[in-house]
Amino acid sequence: MGRPVFLGASVLALVLLGAIAWWGLGPAHTSGEIAPRQGWTILRPPHDVNALAEHAGKIWAGGRDGLALLDPKSGAVLPLPDGTPDMGYVKALLIDRAGRLWVGHRTGLARFDGVNWWRIAVSPTAPPGPVTALVETQDGRILVGGEAGLAALSNAGLAPVDMPDGQAGRAVLALFEDAGARLWVGLSSASLGGLLVEAGGTWRALGRDDGLAHLRVNHITQDREGRIWLATGFGQQGGACASDRSGNRDSWRCIGARDGLASDMVRLVFEDRHGQFWFGTEFDGAAVVLAERSLRLARADGLSGFELKAMLEDSLGNLWLGSDKGLTRIDATATALFPADPTKPKGGRE
């Protein structure tokens, strides 16, 4: 079972508290066993989950075997809508501002408006290739990342996006647009990858010299304080990297296993409504952090698998965790993993 870990003034705690200085301490110490987890349910099928979305009051899960549709209250698998195409290796789901569901998969892109499906095939060698990431930009573009690069969707179809010299055709793992309309592109290669950022038509590339822990960028998100988070790594190397609140390229700081995470390789970063940060890994489960408190989670705690690949907090407050072995649904009543901090005033965020 997972153990509570008290990190004190570690690098991890300082990142989450927004501190300016950074210190590294020794290994985190543990304190006491946790009770068996109530409100956690493992769901199979689906047996592999890469992406999650909520659409029209239902939970959609995409993975190796295609799409699955689930009831948010019970977790029961529901029939897919009539006409749902066969799609294998679904790796990206997106709900656009018009309320339509987009599905990125191995052989193309699909869109569902609640009644009808629309599809477009992709070439395995021309951008984007097999689809791995989707984002809708503030100017209404749908950008599609894949194993053969980055493309933009228009009425004429998919067209390659102009990239910086030497980056065209590089495999894309993650796409994100921040609150300031900057586009963040996470590349896949552990040796030639890194992070690309576009703002106002100007691109810049970031790598190890800028402070990134690893050149393979698995996931990108922005927390409620405005920090950009990168989940990076491959094998046993990597880390979770946080920017300052403006995303300054000179201010990246990275954390890993020595700071309380479950491993150095980080698959995703997710902040829930309680302000808890979830750091998923490929082989070692997850760590959940709230301020200076941390909890490591494994299959014994209710994770469906060791590789945490996708997370969703639905409109009812339930958490959904997708892994290489299925889904974990955490009831809204069980999502706060830490006791209330007695030093916080009542009604304040935990």
Image (spheres, rainbow, N blue to C red):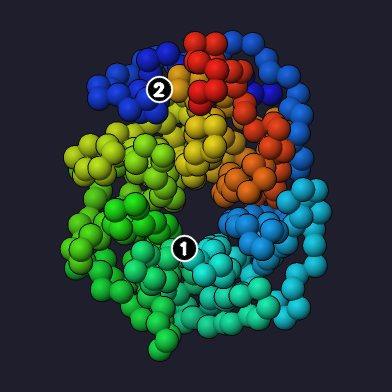
Quick check: 183 above or below 334? below
Q: Which residue is under mark 2?
A: 13
Q: Is residue 334 left or right of residue 249?
A: right
Q: Is residue 50 above or below residue 285?
A: below
Q: Nearer the viewer, residue 22 or 18?
A: 18
* Earlier residue among tags 1 and 2: 2
Residue at disc 1, secondary structure: strand
Q: Residues within 10 Å of mark 2 (few under 14, many from 20)?
A: many
Image x and y of residue 141, in percent = 38, 72
Q: Residue at x 53, y 83 (%)?
A: 120
The image's mark for residue 133 is 1
At 72% from the left and 38% from the top, the residue drawn is 331
What amino acid is found at the position of numbered circle 1 in the picture?
Ala
Lateral position of residue 148 relative to residue 307, left or right? left
Estimate the x, y position of residue 55 in percent, counting from the top left: 63, 62
Q: Amino acid at mark 2?
A: Ala
Looking at this view, is 109 or 117 the one in front? 117
Residue 342, given in percent of the width and then of the height, sits at: 54, 11
- In the rendered image, which quarter is residue 126 located in? bottom left
209 is higher (above) or lower (below) than 44 = above
User: What residue is shown at x 68% (from left), y 37% (from top)?
Assistant: 332
Under circle 2, the secondary element is: helix
For residue 176, the mark is none
Q: Position of residue 303 (x, y in %)?
A: 68, 38
Q: Quadrant of residue 114?
A: bottom right
Question: How much space separates mark 1 and mark 2, taking CA atoms?
Answer: 30 Å
Any part of residue 182 in sight: yes
